[in-house]
Amino acid sequence: SRCLDGIKAKQDRELQTWVNNQSFILEDLASNSGRSTVLDMFKRSQRNFVNYRENNCRWQYLVLSPDASAAVAYKKCYITLTQYRIEELAKLNE
């Protein structure tokens, strides 16, 4: 479980880097076009992703709770969904 904590923290940092990168790109686009809608929608989609990830992993935790494997299941879910989001944002920059 401790090993997963380290992976989870690393994934969070990497995701934040990609979110910041995409925000920077969209801020530049908004300043050039005068339209900030795309940036607002991206920020909303990121908030929605965070909420989805939390809820999706939490129900998996609750199914197994109070078993010790519940925390591991939560962390694995969190890491997997975070990795998918990183991959999605990385593809936007290809």
Image (tube, rainbow, N blue to C red):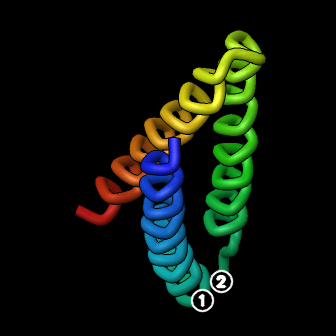
Residue 92 appears at what percent x and percent y?
35, 58
Residue drawn at 48 percent across, 42 percent down: 79
State the image quarter where residue 74 is shown: top right
Q: How many marks?
A: 2
> Between marks 1 and 2, how big is the CA–CA gap?
5 Å
Task: Give the amino acid type for the residue marked by disc 1 in the picture.
Answer: Ser
Residue drawn at 43 percent across, 49 percent down: 3
Of marks 1 and 2, the one in the foreground = 1
In the rendered view, would you say 23 is above or below 37?
below
Residue drawn at 64 percent across, 31 percent down: 71
- The residue sitting at the left extreme is 94
Secondary element at image label 1: helix
Residue 55 appears at what percent x and percent y?
75, 30
- Name the residue beneath numbered marker 1: 31
In the rendered view, would you say 27 is above or below 87?
below
Residue drawn at 66 percent across, 50 percent down: 45
- Is disc 2 surrounded by few (<14), some (14 to 19) or many (20+) residues within 10 Å? few
- Is disc 1 surrounded by few (<14), some (14 to 19) or many (20+) residues within 10 Å? few
Q: Which quarter of the rendered picture does the C terminus lie within?
A: bottom left
Horizontally, residue 89 falls left or right of residue 40, namely: left
Asked whether 9 or 23 is in front, the reply is: 9
- Name the residue beneath numbered marker 2: 34
Horizontally, residue 40 falls left or right of residue 2, namely: right
Residue 73 appears at what percent x and percent y?
56, 25
Residues under numbered marks 1 and 2 in contact, where contact means CB atoms less than 8 Å apart:
yes
Asked whether 91 or 67 is in front, the reply is: 67
Asked whether 18 or 93 is in front, the reply is: 18
Residue 27 appears at what percent x and percent y?
58, 82
Task: Give the amino acid type for the residue marked by disc 2 in the picture.
Answer: Gly
